[in-house]
Image: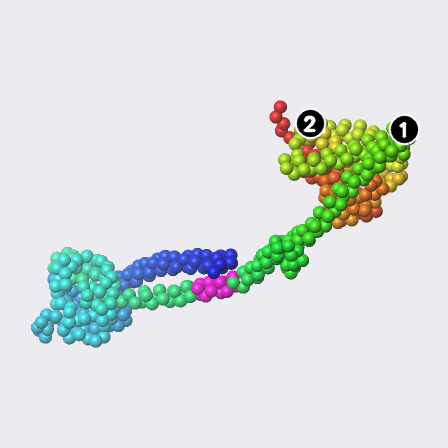
Amino acid sequence: MQRSILDRIYLLFLLVLLSSFLIIIVVTSVSTRRTLSAEKVETLRNETKLVARQTIGLYLNGDISDDELSEALEYYSDILNADFWYVDSYGRMIAISNKKSIKGEGNSSGTASDADPQHISGVEYDKIPANIFELDKNYKLGEEFTETGSFYELYSADVLTINLPLIFSQFDAAGNEVRSNGGALICHASITSVNSLLLNIYGMIYIPCLFIILVSFVLLWFLSRRVIQPVKRLSSVAKAYSEGNFDEKTGIDSNDELGQLAKSMEYMADEFSKLEQYRHDFISNISHDFRSPLTSIKGYVEAILDGTIPPEMQDRYLGIVLNETKRLTKLTQGLLDLNNFDLYGQYLKLSKFDVAELINPMLNTFEIKCIEKNIAIYMNNSAEDTEVYADQTKIQQVIYNLIDNALKFTPEGKRIFISITDLGKKLKISVKDEGIGMDEETSRKIWTRFYKGDQSRGKDKGGSGLGLAIIKEIIKAHNETIEVSSNPGEGSDFYFTLTKASSVEIEE
C-alpha cells in the first residue's frame, strides 16, 4: 500500500517526538532519582545523628538500660519510619528498634530469634547475628558510609543503609578529655519513598505532557487534513489536465499559497485549452501572410506574360512584385530569427553607445509617414547620462519597431512621445502614442507570435505579427524587461529598460 506524504510526515513526526519523549524521561528520571537519593541520604544522615545524640549518649553514660535504649530506638523508628541498630565497638548487637534488647541471658543462641512482625522492608530478624562481624568480618564499623541494597540479604527489598560511627568524649579525674569509641548506629530506611516521589513527579509532569502530545497529534491530524485534501485535489486536477481534460476545476478559493497555486493551475489549463485555437490561428495567419504576396506576384507575373499589362507599364508592376518579395523575405527572416532565438538564444554584440544619439537620427526615417498622417513625434530626454551597454543594432531594431508600431495605430493629427528616464543604474526608454489603445487581454497577447487582433491590424494589413515577439526576445536576451500600459481609447505606452554603461564592469 502506497503511503501519502502526510502519512510519512505524520509517522516521522511521531517517531521523533516519541523518541525525544523517551530520552527526556530516561535522562530526567536518572537525574531526579540521583537528586532525590542524595537528599534522602543527607536527611537520613542528619536523622541518624539526631537519634545518636538523643539515645546512644545516654546509654553509654549509664543513664538508660538496654531495654530503655530499645524502646527509645523503637520510638524514633516509628516517627522516622526507619530501623535503627546499635552496635558496640566490638560489633555486638546491643539494641534493635521494633525488637526488645537481644543482649542478655534470655538469648542463648546469640541471635535475634524473637522477631517482631512490625518492621520496615521485611527484615528477617532470625537471621540477624549477635555480632555484626558475623555478617562480614571486614565490616567497616568505624567508617561512615552509605549503601543501598538488601544489607547482606537480611531485607527482602532494597533499603538505604547509613553506618554512623560514634565517638564520645569523657573527662577523667584530672579533667582531661578522653575520646572513646562508642561503636556505630546503623540506620536502615526504605527507598520506596523515593520511588513514590518519582511516581508523583511522573504523574505531575509526564502524564500532562503525554496528554499534550496526544492532543497535539489530534490537532495535527485535523490541520494536516485541511492541507492535504486541497493537495490531493490539486493532484487529481493535474492528472485530469495531463489527460487533456482542461475543463476540470480545483474548487479551491482560499487566499493562501494553495489558493494561488490553484488559480495558476486553472489559468494554465485555460491557456492550454486555447492552444488548439492558437495553433489554428498560427496556421491561418502565416498562410494569409504568405498567400497574399504570392497571389499578387503570381497575378502580376501572369499579366505581364500574357500581355494584359502593356510593356510601358511593366516596370511599375515589377516594382510591386519586388516589394512583395521583400515582404516575403522579411517575414521569412523573422521566422528564422525567432526559431534561432528558441534554439540557441540571442547572440549579442555588446558595446557602449549613447541611446539618445541612436534615437534622434532614427526619427528622420519616419518623417514622410508623419507628414502623410499629420502626426508629430516629440523627444524628451531627462537623463544626463544616456550611455548604455547593449547590442546597438538590436536595440535600434527594438526602437524602430516600437515607433513604427505606434505610427500604425495612431490616428491622424495625434502625437507620439519618446522619452528617456534615469532610473539610477538603468535607463527607461518609453514610446507612447495617442492611438486606439488595448484592453488587458489584448495587452497580454500582443507578445504572442502571429497574434494580430482587430485592433493591432489597424488600417495597415501588412503586419506579420512577429515584430513585438522579436522585440520581447531581444530585450529578454539583454536580461532587461519590456512592458506595455494601455487602455482602450487612451493610447499605449511601450517601455523597456537598459543598463547604463557606468554601472557595468567591462573588461577591456
Q: Nearer the viewer, mark 2 or mark 1?
A: 1
Q: Report which residue position mark 1 lands on.
A: 311
Mark 1 neighbour class, 10 Å CA radius: few under 14, some 14 to 19, many 20 or more:
few
Considering every residue shown, the one lying at the far front of the view is 306
Q: Which numbered tag is attached to residue 22? A: none
Overall secondary structure of the magenta section: helix
Q: Amino acid at mark 2?
A: Lys
At a point 59% along the width and 58% down the height, the residue shown is: 236
Q: Secondary structure at mark 1?
A: helix
What residue span does the magenta drawing correspond to?
208-220
Q: Secondary structure at mark 2?
A: strand
At a point 72% along the width and 40% down the height, the residue shown is: 469
User: Which residue occupies the foreground of this view, 71 or 212?
Assistant: 212
Quadrant in which residue 353 is drawn: top right
Residue 203 position within the rendered picture, expressed as x and y whole percent measured from the top left: 40, 67
* Quadrant where the image shows the C terminus: top right
Q: What distance separates the C-alpha of mark 2 from that of mark 1?
A: 52 Å
Q: Mark 2 vs mark 1: which is more N-terminal? A: 1
Residue 333 position within the rendered picture, expressed as x and y whole percent measured from the top left: 72, 34
Mark 2 neighbour class, 10 Å CA radius: few under 14, some 14 to 19, many 20 or more:
some
Q: Is residue 503 visible?
A: no
211 part of magenta stretch: yes
Quadrant in which residue 57 is drawn: bottom left
Q: Amino acid at mark 1?
A: Pro
| On screen, residue 249 above or below 429 | below
Residue 407 position within the rendered picture, expressed as x and y whole percent measured from the top left: 83, 38
At a point 73% along the width and 45% down the height, the residue shown is: 282
Q: Report which residue position mark 2 lands on.
A: 352
Quadrant in which residue 396 is drawn: top right
